[in-house]
Image: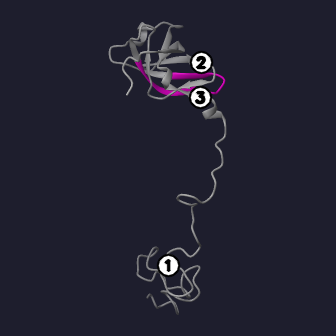
Amino acid sequence: MEPDPPEQIQHVGLFLNSSEGELVYQVVTQGQIPRFNAFVYTENKAKIGKIEEILGNTEDVMFSVKPAPGVQPASINEGDKCFISPTQFSPLRMFTDPPKPRGRGGRGGGRGGDRGGRGGGFRGGAGGFRGGAGGRGGVPGGRGNFGGGRGSFGGGRGRGGFGRGG
């Protein structure tokens, strides 16, 4: 946990104006974006408030600050500097570089699994949701379609005509 106020602070922005009780600042750091919920301070480490939102595009970044109790937006002048802890920055490339594609397999695997669904197999088993043990209609055996669920070859529940629910 970081002390409040932090031992070191870094210049992050210039005050532009206030809007709906929040303070809007222009980011002045190159290649660094302030993090959400970071506390913002004056040069003498008096707390101004907490960062609520990051605004604008990557070339023209701004952020809004929810003032701390007792801080009046009218008491801050256009061009006033604000500071945050150096640990409360994220690199700009985190927002601009596309994420690396993840490899398939490994822990957790991909979505979908095999086509047999629940139980599947060549004979027997629940055979997925259709004609399986419920899932769709709530009736054991589902609708009882023609032969097991998808992915099973004629086994499981629902084998036979329409009327045999299991």
If the image is split into quadrants, where does the N terminus sit? top left
Write the start and end of the magenta stretch as one range. Answer: 49-63
Question: Label 1 vs label 3: CA separation?
Answer: 48 Å
N-terminal of the two: label 1 or label 3?
3
Residue at screen point 53% across, 57% down: 107
N-terminal of the two: label 1 or label 2?
2
Residue type for callout 3 = Pro
Return the residue found at the far left. 70
Label 2 SS: loop
Residue 150 in percent (x, y) is at 58, 79
Residue at the disc numbered 3: 91
Residue 14 in percent (x, y) is at 54, 12
Residue at the disc numbered 2: 29
In the picture, residue 137 is in which quadrant?
Answer: bottom left
Question: What main secondary structure does the magenta stretch of the protein show?
Answer: strand
Question: Label 1 vs label 2: CA separation?
Answer: 57 Å
| Tags 3 and 2 touching, CB below 8 Å | no
Label 1 SS: loop
The residue carrying pointer 2 sits among few (fewer than 14), some (14 to 19) or many (20 or more) residues within 10 Å by Cα, namely some
Residue 33 in percent (x, y) is at 56, 25
Residue type for callout 2 = Thr
Residue type for callout 1 = Gly
Q: Does 58 lie within the magenta span?
A: yes
The residue carrying pointer 3 sits among few (fewer than 14), some (14 to 19) or many (20 or more) residues within 10 Å by Cα, namely few
Residue at the disc numbered 1: 119
Residue 29 in percent (x, y) is at 59, 18
Residue 98 versus residue 86: which sits nearer the camera? 86
Its colouring scheme is one colour
If the image is split into quadrants, where does the C terminus sit? bottom left
Q: Does 146 lie within the magenta span?
A: no
| Tags 1 and 3 touching, CB below 8 Å | no
Label 3 SS: strand
